[in-house]
Image (spheres, rainbow, N blue to C red):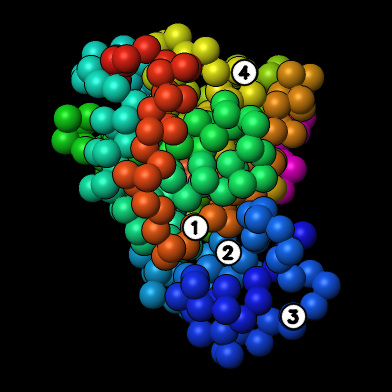
Amino acid sequence: MTILNIEQYSEFGVDAEETKVPIDEEELVLDNGFVVPQINSFGHTFRDYDAESQRQEGVENFYRTNHINQTYDFVKKMREEYGKLDRVEMSIWECCELLNEVVDESDPDLDEPQIEHLLQTAEAIRKDYPTEDWLHLTGLIHDLGKVLLLPSFGELPQWAVVGDTYPVGCAFDESIVHHKHFKENPDYNNPAYNSEYGVYSEGCGLNNVLMSWGHDDYMYLVAKENKTTLPSAALFIIRYHSFYALHRSRAYKHLMNEEDVENLKWLQIFNKYDLYSKSKVRVDVEKVKPYYLSLIEKYFPAKLKW
Ligand SMILES: O[C@H]1[C@H](O)[C@@H](O)[C@H](O)[C@@H](O)[C@H]1O
Ligand SMILES: [Fe+2]
Ligand SMILES: [Fe+2]
């Protein structure tokens, strides 16, 4: 793995002198590959939900409301309602531009408009996997479901759109961020939903598991129903990229089937770029736009139902 040197830290808007991260000469960047930074734009390690920072309190409040309200019944209703895709017609790129307006309150590592995050992710992947164009496009679109926050998509509250996701209908795993707030979720004390398996069975496959409602499952539905030609690994990445309890903490493995195990390998590759590309360094949208438009044309119809 490559790490940042002093000059590169300041590119990330952080005072390098203060970070005191030991620099191993041999690990300095020698190629043009993506560099995993050790700290985020606020001077903390990534995904530190307890670090005292300007974002900590807002993020914890976000998770409190999220954990109280995401119940099995709520998720079922939302999936049925939003699965109709009868709200808007537009292209993938138009949707990317809408994300100019969106800032994610659940994220301790980023307070930039989401379009930056889409391009940062896609461009970081492109550096290390130049020939996997499907993965570049997956980076670009993985968070488009955040348009659910906007008025024409129902203006859902942040807790029903962003943040990490997890299964509903079985016990909430301890590794989920700010787990303690689940105590106020009605499903927490419901014996039908609070055992290890709950309504599921061993190896039933994630496709049969209801996930907390948000941008991931929504964008998966959009891509699938509009008949994208992206490979199944791309759909899996889009659908489960916020499922950190699985792809980082290895919880809920007992629900996976063989296909999930295969797809998880790509999700883990993807996560490195989704998480560690978050920075204050902006991508020049106009410069990269023609490339991404060509990928959109290859894998999607011109207009999609949302
Ligand atoms: O706060 C973030 C953000 O909402 C991301 O889009 C999501 O994928 C992550 O899981 C979450 O931690
Ligand atoms: Fe996301
Ligand atoms: Fe993301």
Q: Which residues are magenta?
A: 249-255
Marks 3 and 1, how far apart in space?
A: 21 Å
Residue 250: say if magenta.
yes
**Percent position (x, y) of residue 153?**
22, 29
Viewed as shown, does residue 146 lie left or right of 47? Answer: left
Q: Which of the two residues, 176 or 1, is positioned nearer the viewer here?
A: 1
Marks 3 and 2, how far apart in space?
A: 19 Å
Viewed as shown, does residue 298 lie left or right of 261? Answer: left
Residue that label 3 marks: 23
Q: Which of the two residues, 203 or 193, is positioned nearer the viewer here?
A: 203
Given contact means CB atoms under 8 Å apart, are the residues at marks 2 and 1 in contact?
A: yes
User: Which tag, 4 or 1, sits closer to the chain's start?
Assistant: 4
User: Which tag, 4 or 2, sits closer to the chain's start?
Assistant: 2
Q: Which of the two residues, 215 or 200, is positioned nearer the viewer here?
A: 215
| Residue 17 found in image quarter | bottom right
Residue that label 4 marks: 232
